[in-house]
Image (tube, rainbow, N blue to C red):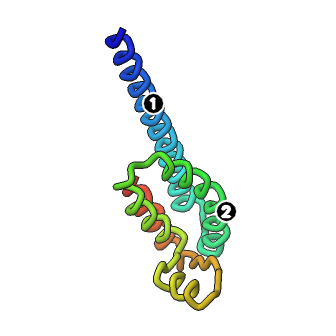
């Protein structure tokens, strides 16, 4: 009877680990695919005046994928992922902390300066994954 109970708990743990791993891999794949498509579109189709518009639209799509991926990422990876995401959005964590300490609650994003800067931000985020 105790052997059956032990096997039951082992199978539950294995099921949970497999579910987590499957979700982790699928969200990672979705984020990498979107970033790859974005990188291709920016490199080949985006002109300098359209960089801000493309970046702003990409935030909406990638933000959702980033949140899901960070939920399933290991705690060790979350810190590096958060820094890469802040870099992609153009956030300065020190500046945000200072504003929060002053009582100002804002979400400051700095768009890429040009097409090459945008491509660098995409590449940096992809490398962390």
Foreground tag (1 vs 2): 1
Q: Is the Cβ of the residue at disc 1 closer than 8 Å to that at disc 2? A: no
Residues packed near mark 1 inside 10 Å, few (<14), some (14 to 19) or many (20 plus): few
Considering every residue shown, the one lying at the far bottom of the view is: 102
- Counting residues from the start of the chain, the first of labels 1 and 2 encountered is 1
Percent position of residue 90, x then y: 52, 75
Percent position of residue 51, x then y: 61, 71
Label 1: which residue?
16
**Residue at figure coordinates x 46%, y 40% from the top left:** 24
Q: Pick the residue in front: 37 or 59.
A: 59
Residues packed near mark 2 inside 10 Å, few (<14), some (14 to 19) or many (20 plus): few
**Residue at figure coordinates x 54%, y 54% from the top left:** 66
Considering every residue shown, the one lying at the far left of the view is: 3
Is 37 rendered above or below residue 57? Answer: above
**Residue at figure coordinates x 39%, y 25% from the top left:** 14
**Quarter where residue 21 is shown:** top left
Taking the image as shown, residue 90 lies to the left or right of residue 129, namely: right
Q: CA distance from mark 1 to mark 2?
A: 35 Å
Is 100 rendered above or below residue 39? Answer: below
Q: Secondary structure at mark 2?
A: helix
Label 2: which residue?
57
Considering every residue shown, the one lying at the far top of the view is: 1
Q: Secondary structure at mark 1?
A: helix
**Residue at figure coordinates x 35%, y 16% from the top left:** 7
Q: Pick the residue in front: 88 or 68.
A: 68
Percent position of residue 110, x then y: 57, 79
């Amino acid at each position: 009877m105790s052997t059956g109970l032990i096997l039951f708990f082992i199978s539950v743990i294995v099921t949970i680990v497999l579910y987590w791993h499957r979700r982790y891999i699928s969200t990672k794949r979705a984020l990498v695919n979107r970033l790859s498509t974005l990188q291709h579109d920016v490199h080949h189709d985006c002109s300098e005046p359209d960089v801000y518009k493309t970046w702003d639209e990409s935030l909406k799509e990638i933000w959702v994928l980033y949140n899901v991926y960070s939920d399933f990422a290991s705690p060790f990876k979350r810190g590096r992922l958060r820094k890469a995401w802040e870099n992609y959005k153009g956030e300065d964590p020190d500046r945000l902390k200072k504003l929060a300490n002053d009582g100002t609650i804002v979400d400051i994003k700095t768009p890429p300066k040009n097409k090459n800067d945008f491509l660098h931000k995409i590449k940096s985020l992809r490398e962390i994954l």
